[in-house]
Each structure stands twice: as C-alpha cells, then as structure tokens.
Amino acid sequence: MIGTLYFLALLGSALAWGRMDVWREVAARNGTGGGGGGERCTCDAFLPSSTFPIKDLIAVEETAGEISYRLELEIGKLEEYDIKMTVYAEKIVKLTGKVEVVEENPDDYNDADLEEIKVEIKQVEALIEELQLSIKSSTTVFESLRVEITAMVNKLDTLEKIYDKNLVLATRREYIKIQIELEECEKRHQEIFNPNIGSCAHTGIIKVSKPIVSQLNAHLSSGYKYGGWGKDSKPIPDRKSMYWYSGYSSASIVDIRFYTDYKNLILRTPFLHQNLASGWTGTGNNFIIRENCLYYQINSPFGLAKLNFTSVKYESRVIAGASSSFSYTNSPNQNFDFSADETGLYVTYAKDETRGKLVIAKINEASFGLEEEWHTSVYKPGVSNAFMVCGVLYAVKTVDIHTEEIFYTYDTKTKTETYVNVPFERFQDKYSNLDYNPTDQKLYMYNDGYYVSYHLWFNHTAPATEPPLALEEGSQSIIENNM
C-alpha cells in the first residue's frame, strides 16, 4: 500500500508541474568545425522543491495502530473497575459492621482482635488507593489519546491540502473510526460512573455486564432458592435507599424484609420484617416493590394482589382470560410477572386463547386496573424470564448451564417486535426472579439464593423512537369492571 501511495504521489506531483513543453531541437556543430555535422536533442525540466512526505504518512499509520491497541486495553479495564468498586464497597460495609460491633462491646475483644481489624482497614485503604490510581490513569490515557488523534487529524488535513486528495481522504476516514471508538469508550465510562437515570433516549440494551454477586440471602441458606430482592422502583421520599428481600423454600411469598440501605442488607439487619396474613400470602416469585406497595400473584382467587405497606391496605384483582397453565421454563407458578420501568407498572401473563403466548398489560397504579394490553408472538414456556425497560419488553431464555440470552423484544410504543442476541452470564444454575429497576438502571436477579445484579449498556448512537401520538390497532382498553 505504501509503495502504491509513493508511486501515485510522484505521478501526481509530475502532473502538477505542468507539461514539459520546453523540448526543443538545437542545431549544433561539431567541435571540429568540419562538415557532416550532427544534431543533438536536449530538454529543460523544472523539478519541484519538495516531494511527497511518505515518512510522515508511515508515522501516522504506526501511530493509529498504537492508539487502537491502547484503546482496546482501556475498554477492557472499564468493566474491571466496575466490578472492583462493588467488591470494595461490600468489604467496607462488612468492615464497618465489625467496627460497630466492637464499639458496642469493647470488653469482648482483645488486642489481637483489634489488630486484625486494623490490618483489614489498611488492606481496604490500599485497595481503594489502587483503584483510584487506576481510574485516574485511565482518564489520563483518554486525554492523551484525544490529543494524539487531534494531532494525527491535523497532519492528515495538511497532507490533504497539498497532495493527492483521494488517497489521503481514504486514509483519513480510517482514522476517524478510531476517534469514534474513543468516544464510545468514553461513553461507556460515563454510563458506568454517571448513568443518565430516567432517560429513554436510546434504542435498547446492547450489553449486560458480568454478574455482580452481593452475598447469600438473609436466611444464610441455599435452600431458599425461590424469592427476590432489589430496590423500590418508585421509592417514597424517606426510603430512596431502601432494599428488600423475600425468600422461601418453595415458589411462595409469606414474608418480606426491608433494609434502610445496602449496608444493612449486607449486615442482614432489617428495620421491618413483615409477615403476610394467612389470607394475603402469595405464590410465584416475580413480585416487586413499587411506591412502598408489594405487587404479587395469588391463587385464591387466581389473580393479582397489591399490599400497601404505608396504609396496610390489601387489594386483589382477577384478570379475565389469564391462565394458570403457562409458567416460565425453569420455575413453577410464574403465571404473573410484574415489571416496572421509566414509563410505569406492567404485568405479563398468558391466556388459553392466545395458546400460551405472552401478553403485556399496563397497570393503573391508582385504581389497580389494567389500562392497555398488547399481544406478543413469543411462547411463554419457552421463556426463562422477562422484564420491561422504557416501555419495551425484553424476553430472556436459557442457552446453557452458564448463559442466559435476551433474545426477543416487544416495543409497546410502536407495536413492533424484534429478535436480538444479548447474552449474559449466570452465577448459579437456576433463578426465579429477574427485574429491571429504573432508579439505577440495573437488573436484579435472585439466583439460587444469592443476591446478583447486572449493569446495562444502552445504544445511544441511533435515534430513539418517539412514542405515537394516538393508540394504534393491537392495543386494547381493559375496563376494570370486567376484571
């Protein structure tokens, strides 16, 4: 390629000099002055003062290769920083708990115990300093790469103005791709450390992080395989940092624990342990907490239930046509699945008349009635779980013993469905609860008794679809009185 560029550069330079029209014949006599004189042909050529700087182009090409390699390294580091931050936060929480216990009962601990805690504190401090240096180093690298790319583009602009424009433009387009990669890398960095909470200015999920494992459940038992955990998706003012957990040995819900914050969740110290009254117990595990209300499935009668923990008010509703015959692949009694996102509260289920295909319904939170209903083409028993993000249903299936995959989406705004491929890793074999929380844009999974969460990456490069101004065919109003 470089050889071709060199040849074309010389050729282009020659054409730029103008035509060599100074050829001329000059009659000249022999030096002897005799007859039989000969003729000689001469030409005058005007050479330019400079040639194509091929060394500059090679240097730019080498710089681009080096930048691409450094970018790949930094992109890989971003996910490592995210996981490390979660791990370090958990270490701090556990260590804080130990210190508080020592402060409350100082006589129960000897010098050796205190020295051990001091060592742990120093280790955590060292880990945090290491992470801070790593993040600072990555920020410095991003700034350095931007400066180098700017210099490289300026150099190419100069070459473009002086020399063969077509070839330089083609080369320049390759290096613009590198600049776009840098911007994408910075965008991922921004999404991890400063997510745009509440925004739907994207076209969907494009990546799921590795599983972030907090710990085993509050019962300290792997036998409590069924349940859920997470945060309130629309927290009331004094409970914005609240977490909740409910677990059981079967697909039932009999009680729920509330924690003031993540620290107390890890320390297993709830501020409220609420047992459900005998007539209020539920079944299935796709329940959620929204605005201090528990939304869950009941079997007597078969339908939906809402328990307001602020007013201690219980309500139930029966969904006409909803079937108890269709559950998710890996867990029983998952007939109703509640989901909450930036646009409101939803529930999914299947009907006999739809032959087991998933139905999405939006819930009016004030009246606890259904507002709209959408019919999808995906068969519920072939789905391991589902959740909503910005009015879009994401259906998940099990690929193998380690992998789940978001394979299907249905957009309630445009009434369109799409098959996608977004794989992510499971921590344990089975799970019973998977939900998105719009307050932090994370997925929460209850995975064989463990608290697991995931970060999400969204596609911000394509324009987001605007919601329709009026309802389209395919949506159906549901009258609460018919329920």
Image (cartoon, rainbow, N blue to C red):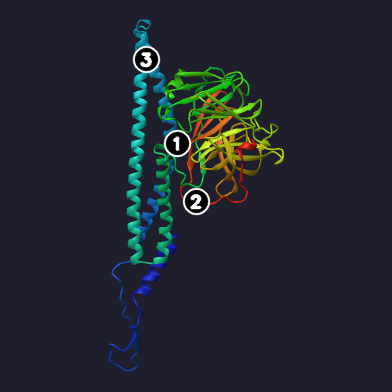
148 over 224 or under it: above or below: below
Type of amino acid under label 2: Glu
Residue 473 or residue 325, whichever sits in front:
473
Residue 29 or residue 49, whichever sits in front:
49
Q: Earlier in the sequence, mark 1 or mark 2?
A: 1
For label 3, the crowd category at 10 Å Cα-Cα, with few meaning under 14, some 14 to 19 and many 20 or more, is few
Q: Earlier in the sequence, mark 3 or mark 2?
A: 3
For label 1, the crowd category at 10 Å Cα-Cα, with few meaning under 14, some 14 to 19 and many 20 or more, is some
The answer, for residue 270, to whether it is visible in the render is no
Quote the CA–CA distance across marks 1 and 2.
31 Å
Quadrant (top left, top right, bottom left, bottom right) of the C terminus: top right
Q: Which residue appears farthest toward the front when viewing the image?
A: 481
**Numbered tag placed on residue 100 in the rendering:** 3
- Side (left or right) of 259 relative to 279: left
Q: Position of residue 410 (x, y in %)?
A: 59, 45
User: Do labels 3 and 1 touch, CB within 8 Å?
Assistant: no
**Numbered tag placed on residue 466 in the rendering:** 2
